[in-house]
Amino acid sequence: MTQTYEDFSKYGKEFADTGLKSFASLSKGAQAIATEAGEYTKKSFEAGSAAVEKMFSAKSLEKAIEIQSDYAKQSYEAFVAEATKIGDLYAELAKEAYKPFESIVAKAK
């Protein structure tokens, strides 16, 4: 009976330690995602402001439309690249958060 309690206690402590490691990975990953999103927002705002300034200084309607079209294309490409990057960060976050539990799952099998 004492051995069972000791084993249970040992596994409980191991699971708690693993949970803390996983939480640390989640925290680190979430911080990286938030930082990346903040940087993208800043770059996007700056690009939008620059495009508006260019449009107001355009000498003709055709030039303004060209500037707007270029901005839309660049914005779309930047968004797709950023979405891919953030998707990769989420995938890495999931892998890192699961990593501490791999040994426990292997022992359970």
Image (tube, rainbow, N blue to C red):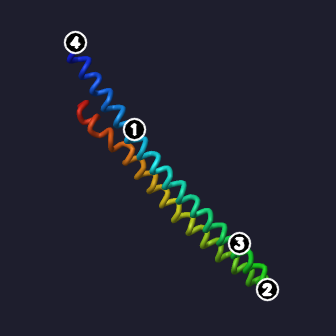
The picture quadrant where one finds residue 75 is: bottom right
Q: Nearer the viewer, mark 1 or mark 3?
A: 1
Query: Quick check: 90 above or below 108?
Result: below
Q: Residues within 10 Å of mark 2 (few under 14, many from 20)?
A: few
SS assignment at label 2 = loop
Q: Which numbered tag is attached to residue 62?
A: none
Q: Nearer the viewer, mark 3 or mark 4?
A: 4
- From this viewpoint, which residue is outermost toward the top? 1
- Counting every numbered tag in the picture gives 4
Q: Which numbered tag is attached to residue 60?
A: 2
Q: Residues within 10 Å of mark 1 (few under 14, many from 20)?
A: some
Q: How far apart are the alpha carbons under marks 1 and 2? A: 61 Å
- The amino acid type, in three-letter code, at marker 4 is Met
The picture quadrant where one finds residue 39 is: bottom right
Residue under label 3, please give it.
Answer: 49
- The amino acid type, in three-letter code, at marker 2 is Ser
Q: Nearer the viewer, mark 1 or mark 2?
A: 1
Q: Which numbered tag is attached to residue 20?
A: 1
Q: How far apart are the alpha carbons under marks 4 and 2? A: 88 Å
Query: Quick check: 42 above or below 107?
Result: below
SS assignment at label 3 = helix
Comes first in the chain, label 4 or label 2: 4
Q: Residue at left 44%, top 56%? A: 88
Front residue of 44/22: it is: 22
- The amino acid type, in three-letter code, at marker 1 is Leu
Front residue of 53/73: it is: 53
Residue under label 4, please give it.
Answer: 1
Task: From the top left corner, tell me how far across and down residue 8 is, in percent.
Answer: 28, 22
